Image (tube, rainbow, N blue to C red):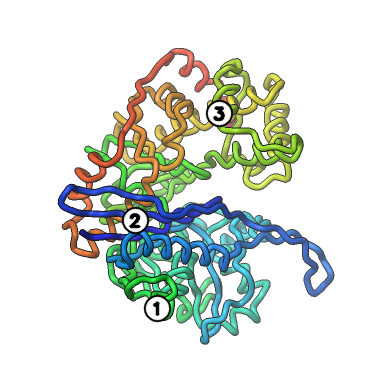
């Protein structure tokens, strides 16, 4: 029996699983789950100017990882064979040479980053950035975050001994490791996409010392061991720490049961929707750049995708309504009032910047609808249906964009991650794109995490050998297209909003 522990950290919660390989096959058990979110403070700077600052509570997250390890120790007799960590794809922490954190870890939605893409472009041409990194400009890129430190908090950069991207920070807390895997490094807009190492040109342009950047390692490498004191505290052996696809999308894509990558669109569906295809090598053409597509390091491949807004919009609507009502709307209620609403009343562009981090998401949706001269959304069911329909139509738009750049047809859509449990959005996606949707596994990120560990631990030879385990352990639900003519008309209306 081989037991591998997966830490899966998203932007709204964390989960800990143990994957078990034995003579009967593979199974995965959840041992701990917790909610977390960015915390906003309104603080004055040295000039007395007050700004909202949003931070992650990294010690709270670490404490819950420890609780997960303790739960695994109780359930599996204190013995594990590997630990892997995946996280959301942004943020990190500057550390002193002695391992002390230099301040709090900012959340990627913090408004300090609102203008940073333009500041990066002033230092190095957009075309050159894309040619080197293959990454599209996004506010949360680590290039923006480190440039902000270099220009606004240079004293911290001078004191820094090393920098740890968010998954590396938790590996450091567990075992003192100071490396980052290539899937996470690839989304920083600081890595040379073709060479797989930090770009000296990018770092120099932004004044970031190369010496503080962590070593880039391949997924599946043993990078350390659980600290003896921590192992004793958890009741565990000094288990190996194994690099995985620590950018959660890389792990999720690795778990998609894809038969033919050329013909399969993959959507990692959650707070964000990562919509793309697996290709052999990065595409950094002018057409790819103009389309806003990114090349992200996969596990033996490249994820050619667009980072779209996902169910964040719905989550924020529920948060605002909870404040107004004094209670949280249940998902059962969401699933009841949404399909009951009138179809195709109005649409939004989910990726419009007003939806990134508004004070009130309901007002943001209403503002977009009014400014685009569409009918008013009169109730919550209509608002939710507008969001879900718009997400499905956006997926079609991104699919067509990707296919135009790499000239590959889509014959099936794989939806993985928490969003694969959203039957309504899955059906809308099949209707919109006009091909079958295969939904699952729900916990794809943790599954991919464990399968990469299994390669590193020598349990399986490669990820191709993982597919039979995944298909036998997790149900995959199929959704066939329906009402395609109406969705075609809706798509034509949807695309006119952005011309």
In the picture, measured across the screen, residue 493 lies left or right of residue 258, that is: right
Please tell me whether mark 3 sits on a helix, a strand or a loop: helix
Residues under labels 1 and 3: Cα distance? 43 Å
Residues under labels 1 and 2: Cα distance? 19 Å
Residue 51 placement (x, y as % from top left): 77, 61
| Residue 346 falls in image quadrant | top right
The circle drawn on residue 18 is 2
Residue, disc 1: 227
Residue 34 placement (x, y as % from top left): 53, 53
Please tell me whether mark 2 sits on a helix, a strand or a loop: strand
Name the residue rendered at 61%, 28% in the picture.
Answer: 384
> Does the CB distance between marks 1 and 2 fall below 8 Å?
no
The circle drawn on residue 332 is 3
Disc 3: CA contacts within 10 A as few (<14), some (14-19) or many (>=20):
few
Residue 301 placement (x, y as % from top left): 28, 53
Viewer-closest of 12 and 195: 12
């Amino acid at each position: 029996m081989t037991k591998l522990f997966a830490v899966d950290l998203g932007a709204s919660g964390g989960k800990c699983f143990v994957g078990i390989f034995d003579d009967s096959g593979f199974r995965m058990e959840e041992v701990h789950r917790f909610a977390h979110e960015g915390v906003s403070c309104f603080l004055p700077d040295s000039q007395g100017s007050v700004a909202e600052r949003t931070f992650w509570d990294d010690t709270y997250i670490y404490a819950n990882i420890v609780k997960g390890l303790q739960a695994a120790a109780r359930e599996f007799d204190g013995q594990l064979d590997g630990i892997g960590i995946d996280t959301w794809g942004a943020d990190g922490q500057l550390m002193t040479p002695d391992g002390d954190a230099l301040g709090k870890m900012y959340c990627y939605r913090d408004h300090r980053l609102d203008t940073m893409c333009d500041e990066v472009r002033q230092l190095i041409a957009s075309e050159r950035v894309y040619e080197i990194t293959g990454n599209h400009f996004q506010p949360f890129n680590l290039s923006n975050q480190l440039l902000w430190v270099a220009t606004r908090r240079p004293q911290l950069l001078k004191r820094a001994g090393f920098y740890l991207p968010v998954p590396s920070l938790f590996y450091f807390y567990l075992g003192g490791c100071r490396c980052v895997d290539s899937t996470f490094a690839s989304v920083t807009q600081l890595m040379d996409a073709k060479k797989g190492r930090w770009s000296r040109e990018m770092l120099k342009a932004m004044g970031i010392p190369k010496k503080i950047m962590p070593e880039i390692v391949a997924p599946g490498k043993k990078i350390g061991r659980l600290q003896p004191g921590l192992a004793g505290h958890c009741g565990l052996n000094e288990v190996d720490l194994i690099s995985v696809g620590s950018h959660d999308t890389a792990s999720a894509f690795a778990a998609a049961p894809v038969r033919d990558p050329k013909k399969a669109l993959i959507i990692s569906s959650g707070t964000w929707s990562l919509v793309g295809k697996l290709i052999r090598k990065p595409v950094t053409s002018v057409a790819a750049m103009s389309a806003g597509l990114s090349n992200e390091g996969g596990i033996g491949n490249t994820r050619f995708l667009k980072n779209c807004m996902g169910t964040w919009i719905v989550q924020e609507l529920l948060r605002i309504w909870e404040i107004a009502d004094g209670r949280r709307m249940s998902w059962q209620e969401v699933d009841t009032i949404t399909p009951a609403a009138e179809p195709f009343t109005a649409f939004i562009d989910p990726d419009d910047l007003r939806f990134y981090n508004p004070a009130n998401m309901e007002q943001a949706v209403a503002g977009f609808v009014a400014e685009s001269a569409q009918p008013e959304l009169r109730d919550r069911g209509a608002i939710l249906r507008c969001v879900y329909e718009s997400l499905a139509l956006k997926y079609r738009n991104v699919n067509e964009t990707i296919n135009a750049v790499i000239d590959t047809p889509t014959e099936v859509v794989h939806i993985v991650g928490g969003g694969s449990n959203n039957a309504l959005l899955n059906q809308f996606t099949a209707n919109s794109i006009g091909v079958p949707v295969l939904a699952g596994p729900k916990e794809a990120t943790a599954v991919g995490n464990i399968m990469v560990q299994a390669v590193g631990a020598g349990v399986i030879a490669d990820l191709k050998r993982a597919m039979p385990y995944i298909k036998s352990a997790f149900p995959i639900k199929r959704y066939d297209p329906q009402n395609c003519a109406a969705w075609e008309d809706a798509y034509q209306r949807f695309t006119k909003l952005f011309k």
